Amino acid sequence: MIARNLTVAALFALTACSGARHDARAANAPHPSASAIAPAVAGPSPWPAPAVTRLRRELDRVLGDPILRTGAGIAIVGPDGALLYGRRERKAYAPASTMKVLTAASALATLGPAYRFVTSFETDADLTPDGTLAGDLALVGTGDPILTSDDLRGGVAALARRGVRAIAGDLVIDASAFSGPEQNPKWSPDDLQYGYAAGTSAISLDQGTVEFHLEPQSAGVPAVVDVRPANDDLVVHGSVTTGYSTNLSIERAPTANDFTFSGTIALGAEQSFYRPVSDQPAFVGGVVRTMLRQRNIELRGNVRVGVAPLAGNTLWRHRSPVLAKLVKQMLWESNNHFAEQLLRTVGTARGVGTERNGAAIEGTVLRSDLVPMDGMRVLDGSGLAPDNRVAALTLATVVARAFADPRLRALPPLFPRVGIEGTVRRRTPTAALGKAWAKSGHIESVNALAGWVRSAAGDPLAFAVVINDRNADAGGADDGIDKMLDVLARAKR
């Protein structure tokens, strides 16, 4: 399972992974193996010149909005990998969440669609007849992006069923498979307080967030705040007063899980708010300690972040859904946390999970499929960093190659259908309805869409449109993009 001898050139100069820590566990733990890099697979025969001429004429007609003419990169790639239509297709733009297309492709190619993350309780100590574990208990994470409090609660219940009544040593949280800052320093500071910018860790719980469940009381009385999951190490200051409207603030201290509440919440229904936590391994340690206590399992030692014994016995193992399902959820929801966890997991093929290592593996996957990477800059896996740069031709070619490369064949059906589901459900194609699959991307001044359309000729036509303009979300541009999808759906050889 491990591929320690994989040599990959560091293709991108990244600054988002300073402070990477290599320790014994990270160096010796099982890492996902990078697939053997195969050459690009030859595609079907090219589209005939008359059909391409007709297609270009129709696309020029529908893509006439000024923003699409001056502020966008556009690429349409045929099933053989040939560029059928392009505008500034090699210019690198901020891609927003269409960056997740590259993350998905590199994860599927490196890990395989059937890959599962494993989280486990491990120990090298014996269990005495009275139920005492005579040493440390370690919780070991490998980057599962979807591990929940309920999953972990089930793990603690499994310990109890095994007869564990006390732990003589420490509770050790092993997150050494990943390294680097949890929240990417290239993200906007304004995003860091919100759940969509949750940090990345090899042991991440509830997608890196904590739930604050607020129960309004009578007018003028502070609402009841229930912290989920319970954690004695999390501190809540202030209060939220029950009133006639909801206008509240939840602020986290920069480097601690101290949250300050203020404002009002409306009478009536209970509400939940999610905020990212810092120092996730320590936070998860506090959660496990609370769960142990709730199961009447005594922890006699401390909670600490460290490295599990390499030859320990596994007391509980939790396996995630297969990677293909996780990629589908990421693309449908535009889930930033999934993307960041996947990029660092890809990076573990080089020894430790960092953005730099993940980007290097990603570049190798793209190069092996002859994907052009003009001006490409990878700072994260989600596209949340405004300084990422990807060309429309890069995105469209990745999608086109997925139909020919066995490593990527799982990718095309994982996109949501345009106008029907996921984050692209509000788009309004007509002829392309039910025939187009895509990933959207939106941050400030960025509007992007990448995916594929099943043409009238039966061919998959890959496309990418990346707009960088202060009026990127203007209605004319979106209308033109939807009409472009219709043209592709009607296209014949």
Image (spheres, grey):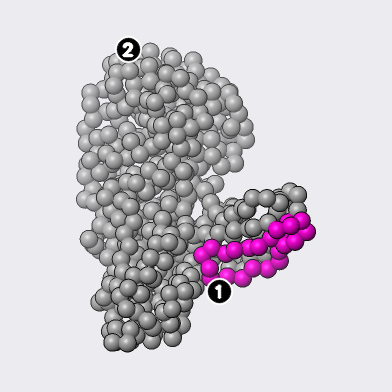
Q: If the image is split into quadrants, where does the N terminus sit?
A: bottom left
The part of the image, by quadrant, that contains residue 434 is: top left
Whichever of labels 1 and 2 marks the residue nearer the N terminus, that label is 2
Q: If the image is split into quadrants, where does the C terminus sit?
A: top left
Question: Is 186 placed above or below 373 here?
Answer: below
Between residue 82 and residue 123, name the one nearer to us.
123
Residue 96: which disc? none
Q: Residue at x 38, y 58 (%)?
A: 144
Between residue 465 and residue 148, name the one nearer to us.
148
Kind of element beneath mark 2: helix
Question: Is 53 placed above or below 264 here?
Answer: above
The magenta stretch is 217-242
107 sits to left or right of 304: left
Marks 1 and 2, Cα distance to the nearest angstrom?
Answer: 70 Å
The part of the image, by quadrant, that contains residue 121 is: bottom left
Q: Residue at x 28, y 53 (%)?
A: 115
Kind of element beneath mark 1: loop
Percent from the top left, x then y, of residue 92? 47, 39
Between residue 76 and residue 417, name the one nearer to us.
417
Percent from the top left, x then y, of residue 405? 24, 39
Residue indicated by mark 2: 50
Type of amino acid under label 1? Asp
Question: Is 386 placed above or below 394 here?
Answer: below
Q: Residue at x 37, y 25 (%)?
A: 435
Q: Residue at x 37, y 49 (%)?
A: 326
Q: Is residue 97 visible?
A: yes
Which residue occupies the extreme right position in the image? 220
373 sits to left or right of 18: left
Which residue occupies the extreme front position in the image? 218
The part of the image, by quadrant, that contains residue 446 is: top right
Residue indicated by mark 1: 232
Question: Is 56 placed above or below 123 here?
Answer: above
